[in-house]
Structure formats: structure tokens, C-alpha cells
Image (cartoon, helix red, strand yellow):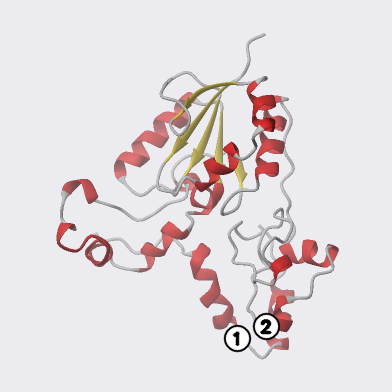
């Protein structure tokens, strides 16, 4: 029986999530024993148009990226979005809050009009093509990556948490960072990271995206308890929660 063929692709990102895959070290050898990696630019020069599972890191920021991801989708039986840039657009989506011409001038100065620097509004992968599974985080949790991939190789559906980070904080006995004067997105952000940031005294930044059915009432209660407003909360949601913004059309 042939092993599933896996290809890993990257778009607009820092490739930090792929580094987390490399950080699996010995465990990655176990995965390679049950799967054939046929394309992965960060680790090999070979390329392939024949693969069963496509793993995508990065957001979609150019028309040619949209065309490429559509081709990848047409070839893959399963497509996995890897990390915040792919799953929710990531920090790259911050530019959607501004006029694109202004963004290019700010970043590239006198080179802003060069053709190869053309850009478009940032999109998460599932805003362009159907995504079958998501591995959340910035960066991803390497253990969660290994779990999801093992499930897929075994033909099982991976179970991704559908409860907020606050649940993990309480389970670990963390002091709520709201008590420390920080506006935390834990009440509305998807768990699965082990409450990594709050566990070391920092607020949740929302890198895993929002749970599908957040307890809005509970979130409002927390905001009111600490004398803040919904706008205060929204100001912290921009980093990983920028929506598809206005276009230049």
C-alpha cells in the first residue's frame, strides 16, 4: 500500500510555522515513515504536482497567489491551513485597514510602483478555496501539528478545541491577566495552545482565531467588571482580527 503523498507550500508569511515542523526533530522521522513528502521548499528542492495532502502556510496577498492556491486545491484531496496567516489572515491582514497605495509607499518608499511589489487585500486561505482542516496559532504548536497529521494519515478526523482559552487558564490555575490590568482575548479565542501567553503573564493576543460561538454575554460581563468598553476590547482584536478591508476599486 502506497504512503500518502504530502506537499507543503508557503505564501505570505515568515515561515515560522514550518520551523515548528522542523522542531519536531525525531518525531518528524516517525511521520516521514508513514508519508512521502513530495514538495517542501524549506527542506527540499524537489517539486511535484501529485499529492494527496497539501499543507499551506501563509496568507493570500496577490492575484497570482489566488491562482496558485486554486491549482493546489484542485490537486489535493485534503488541504490544511497551517498557522494564523493561513487560517485567519494573520498579522498580514493589518494592511487591510489602510489604502493599499499608502501601504506600499510606507513600506517600499520610492520603489512602491515597481511591478513585482504589486499587492492586494490580504485573505486567509479559506477566503479563496475550501479548507478541510486548520492548525491554528502564531506559531503553531508542534505537538498539535503532529496530532493533526497523524489523524489525517490514519483517516481520522482531528478534534480541534471549540472552547475559549479561559478554560485552559482555569485548568492550569493561572491568575487572570485581567486582574493585572491587561485586556485579554482569552474569553473569545479558540483554545488549544495550553494558554501559553497567559501562563507566563501576558494577555492572549487572539492568534488562534475566535471560537465559532463565543459567549458574548460573558465577554461583556468581563469588560464591564473592569470598567472598560467593547471598543477597548476591539482595539486589541485588530492585531489578529482585521477583516477583509476596502478595495481600491
Query: As drawn, is 94 to the left or to the right of 99?
Result: right
Up/down of 175 relative to 126, above or below: below
Across and down, in percent, residue 149 comes to 66, 33
Q: Residue at x 37, y 63 (%)?
A: 96
Q: Of the numbered discs in the image, which one, if any, rests on residue 229?
A: 1
| Farthest residue, direction bottom | 227
Q: Residue at x 56, y 22 (%)?
A: 52
Residue situated in front as seen by the camera: 19 or 103: 19
Disc 2 + disc 1, Cβ < 8 Å: yes
Across and down, in percent, residue 47 comes to 41, 22
Q: Secondary structure at mark 2?
A: helix
Tell me the residue that label 2 is attached to. 223
Res 34 → quadrant: top right
**How dense is the environment of label 2, judged by Cα within 10 Å: few (below 14), some, or many (20 and up)?**
some
Q: Of the numbered discs in the image, which one, if any, rests on residue 172?
A: none
Q: CA distance from mark 2 to mark 1?
A: 6 Å
Query: As drawn, is 61 to the left or to the right of 91?
Result: left
> In terms of sequence position, does the residue under pointer 2 or pointer 1 come before the other?
2
Across and down, in percent, residue 125 comes to 47, 45
**How dense is the environment of label 1, judged by Cα within 10 Å: few (below 14), some, or many (20 and up)?**
few
Q: Secondary structure at mark 1?
A: loop
Residue situated in front as seen by the camera: 72 or 216: 72
| Farthest residue, direction front | 26
Residue situated in front as seen by the camera: 35 or 159: 35
Q: Quadrant of the C terminus?
A: bottom left
| Farthest residue, direction top | 1
Amino acid at each position: 500500500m502506497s504512503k500518502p503523498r504530502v506537499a507543503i507550500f508557503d505564501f505570505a508569511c515568515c515561515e515560522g510555522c514550518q520551523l515548528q515542523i522542523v522542531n519536531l526533530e525525531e518525531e518528524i522521522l516517525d511521520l516521514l515513515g508513514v508519508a512521502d513528502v513530495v514538495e517542501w521548499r524549506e527542506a527540499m528542492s524537489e517539486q511535484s504536482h501529485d499529492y494527496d495532502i497539501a499543507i499551506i502556510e501563509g496568507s493570500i496577498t496577490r492575484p497570482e497567489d489566488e491562482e496558485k492556491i486554486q491549482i493546489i486545491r484542485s490537486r489535493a484531496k485534503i488541504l490544511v491551513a497551517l498557522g494564523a496567516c493561513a487560517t485567519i489572515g494573520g498579522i498580514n491582514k493589518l494592511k487591510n485597514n489602510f489604502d493599499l497605495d499608502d501601504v506600499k509607499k510606507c513600506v517600499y518608499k520610492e520603489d512602491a510602483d515597481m511591478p513585482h511589489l504589486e499587492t492586494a487585500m490580504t485573505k486567509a486561505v479559506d477566503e479563496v478555496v475550501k479548507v478541510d482542516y486548520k492548525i491554528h496559532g502564531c506559531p503553531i504548536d508542534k505537538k498539535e501539528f503532529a496530532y493533526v497529521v497523524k489523524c489525517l494519515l490514519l483517516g481520522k478526523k482531528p478534534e480541534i478545541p471549540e472552547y475559549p482559552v479561559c478554560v485552559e487558564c482555569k485548568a492550569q490555575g493561572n491568575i487572570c491577566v485581567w486582574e493585572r490590568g491587561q485586556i485579554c482575548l482569552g474569553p473569545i479565542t479558540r483554545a488549544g495552545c495550553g494558554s501559553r501567553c497567559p501562563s507566563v503573564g501576558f494577555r492572549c493576543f487572539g492568534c488562534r482565531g475566535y471560537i465559532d460561538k463565543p459567549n458574548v454575554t460573558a465577554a461583556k460581563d468581563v469588560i464591564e467588571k473592569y470598567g472598560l468598553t467593547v471598543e477597548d476590547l476591539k482595539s486589541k482584536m485588530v492585531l489578529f482580527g482585521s477583516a477583509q478591508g476596502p478595495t481600491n476599486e
